[in-house]
Image: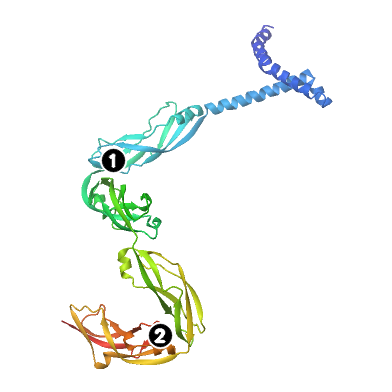
Amino acid sequence: MKKTSNRKNIFSPIAKFFDRWLISPITKFILLITDYFKNNGKGIEKILNNRQALIIISLLFALFAFYAIDCEGVSLVDDNAEMLYGIPVKAVYNEEAYVIEGLPETVDVTLIGRKSNVYLAKQYPVDNITVDLSSLTPGTHKVSLNYKQKVSAVTYKVDPSNVTVVVYKKVSDTREVSTDIIHKDHLDTKLNIDSITLNKDSVTIKGPEHLINQVASVKALIDVDHLTSQKIGSQTLTDVQLVAYDNTGNVVKVEIVPETLQAEVVLSSPYKKVPIRIETEGELDGKAIKSLTSSLKEVTIYGSKEALDKIEYLPVLIDISGINTDKTYTVNLTNPTGVREISDKTITVKLVLDEVITTEISNVRINIDNLDSSRYSAQAVDENSKTVTVIVKGSQSAIDNLEKSSITASVDLSGLTEGEHEVEVVVKGDDNTLNYTPRVKTIKVIITKK
């Protein structure tokens, strides 16, 4: 009987605790629900009015609440892992005397510990990982990367935790600076960068000797997007970026002193009016060109002055292959090399055909082109090779207006040296509606040293 009494004394406070804090509140809650649903179902009302049923339901709710709290408690004490990505790595060393290679810019850190501790550690991450390399001498070294722990209850694992670094002596050299224009396609097509003047012609590059030797050029990158305005005149760009390149155009990571330069950029808008010249490709089907007329006689072109000086006309090419009736072409104009803008984008070309007439122009003198005249002289092997007969095909009206002086014949001697050579005869004429063919396709010339 004593044992039974002792057991009652032990469990009595526990029973009172559950009765006061779990069973009684839950029972009162269920009674409130019973009052609300009293008129909705006699079966439910009967169950809820039964004291034993209420005790069972209350116990089930209590077990459910205990299970939920227990699971949450377990989740707070169980080990958990979280990742911190991209933590910067900072090296401490004599940057004026040495260069370090092999050290990663960032690392990843894994935090392992109780969920509450890991959560706290994530709220106060270390800004960077500092590794002291000041005692290292030139050569290869293996160093450890350690994360400075702010929460001692958390285990920190750095990836990578050990790295191999190479310490080089820093050397320097002086290099000239050239310019390179980027985002040039963003410049107004009627504008041209006339000149660029840098405030320094040369800079100092620093780094390990093997990288210094790789540097083939240092360029100041003139970014069109950084221009304050796109108008004719001069403007100054500050903080122009400098980049070192090797002989294949790859960036070489060396220190450049100063890091940036200042550039004065002059914008201009050179233009030139040039005539349009219609040219043909292919062969007509038994017909001749009577006339070729275009909707425009000339256009205005914009570009660099050097490019414009070389352009005398704007060629427009049309394909006449197999054509035997009159035809009208719509042609998109193409920018020649160095030209950024043309005043008109398209033109129409009207082709009018006629019956084919053939004539011959004799004794057209053959000219010699592209001979190195400082070292060689050339002449035809005989008198018959000094001139050529040209067969001309075209419309009656074009042939009637044909003049012998408008036809030229030539041979190209570029790259040829002393000796006898057989070369091709090329004939051309001013009237591009006519077809010109030499009766003799090749001639022999003799090249002698002077």
**Quadrant of the rendered structure where residue 179 is?**
bottom left
Q: Which image quadrant for residue 429?
A: bottom left
Q: Position of residue 194 (x, y in %)?
A: 30, 58
Q: Nearer the viewer, residue 171 or 191?
A: 191
Residue 119 in sight in this render? yes
**In this picture, is 394 found above or below 222?**
below
The residue to which callout 2 is attached is 434
Whether residue 407 appears in this view of the structure is no
Mark carried by residue 190: none
Residue 415 in percent (x, y) is at 25, 77
The structure residue drawn at horizontal position 58% and vertical position 27%, both measured from the top left corner, is 72
Instruction: Determine the secondary structure under disc 1.
Output: strand
Spatial CA span between label 1 and label 2: 79 Å
Residue 372 position, x and y percent, is: 21, 78
Query: 345 or 140, which lies in front?
Result: 345
Q: Residue at x 33, y 52 (%)?
A: 222
Quadrant of the drawing holding the N terminus: top right
Q: Which residue is mark 1?
A: 141
